[in-house]
Image: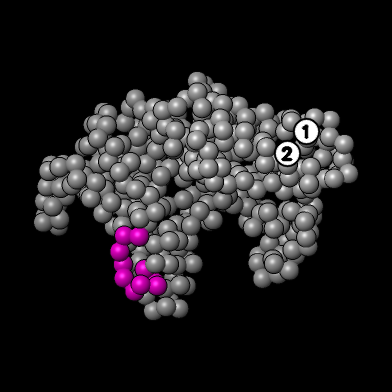
Amino acid sequence: MLNAYYGCGEETGALFDSLKIQNYESFPEHLNKYNCIFINMQEFLSESPNVYEMLVSIRETLLVEFVEEFPGIVFKNKSKLTQTMKDAYNFSRRPFVILIDEWDCIFREYKEDYVSQKAYLDFLRMWLKDQGYVALAYMTGILPIKKYGTHSALNMFSEYSMLEPREFAPFFGFTGEEVESLCASHNVDMEEMRSWYDGYRMKYRSRIGQDWQEVEISIFSPRSVVESILTGRFNSYWNQTETYEALKDYIQMDFGGLREAIVAMLAGGSIPINPSMFANDMSNFKRRDEVLTLLVHLGYLSYDLPLGVASIPNKEVSGVFLDSTTDLEWSEVVGAVSESRNLL
């Protein structure tokens, strides 16, 4: 979508005729005004034996495309990515919009390879930071920007996450209003839908007129809502997109009473967490709060920003936790939940 909007390759205004953005006065300001680069990092990683070969492949692919896209340029150094982009920018006078999907796949697949992780971050910093040819760099992924020590290698980004979605909150999933409309049009029980797939409460500040106001919304998993409507059944669909083997590994780390915290959340409680110590990776854990913060980013937990507490959002995710703890033979967990249900 962003590539179609920003890219100068062809006129795409008609694609947005039925969308809200078309009604904004600023809509034509950036439409088809930029050179666009769109990269799916997961594809490059899957086709490479290691991170270093992946980075070489990205450089070589982009350099070849620059030569093809700008045949009238005499490039100063065709082997240097940054110099080639500077030459293209100086020639075309069009800055670049760089779109990167699955930016964090290296940290998920090479969890313990800190040397490769650092090389990847150094590549991104060299390519994107303080470069005049970059109008916008937009990256999507599960994990926030990786920190090294007290500093981030990519501190020029504004981050939007499950912990602090800011003004992007309504676009993290289906909103409650959207799900109500879908349920009404397909004759589906909204209350049952809510118990299964609701539970992610997000708060953000929105400008209404001349004033800023605090807005709270409910967010539903789009995949789960769609699948339940298509199949006519309420079931666990979301966890099928991610293996819960990782979840079992995390909850076995009984840092600071992690098991007791999970029992409390399975019983409907909320647990205070401090997300500031999270190192933004999937392996470097030293305390309970780091594991719980990762589970928030992965969607296994919901986070209430004003209160600073985490909880299991709904019946679907609760089932994933129960399956994981049952496989781990957490008899005390399953027993506690069963006794709670009997008491109710």
Q: Amino acid at mark 2?
A: Leu
Q: SS at mark 2?
A: helix
> Residue 340: x percent and y percent?
14, 51
For badge 1, the amino acid type reads Lys
* Up-down relation of residue 14 to residue 138 (above or below): below
Q: Nearer the viewer, residue 71 or 275?
A: 71
Residue 29 inside the magenta-drawn segment: no
The residue beneath circle 1 is 78
Q: From what the image shows, is residue 266 above or below residue 233? A: above
Tell me which label, 1 or 2, sits earlier in the chain.
Answer: 2
Q: Main secondary structure of the magenta part?
A: loop
Q: Is residue 70 above or below residue 283?
A: below
Question: If the image is split into quadrants, where does the N terminus sit?
Answer: bottom right
**SS at badge 1:** loop
**Span shown in magenta:** 228-237
Residue sitting at 71 percent across and 57 percent down?
A: 5
- Kindly identify which residue carries mark 2: 63
x 74%, y 30%: residue: 80
Disc 1 residue crowd, few under 14, some 14–19, many 20+, Cα 10 Å? some
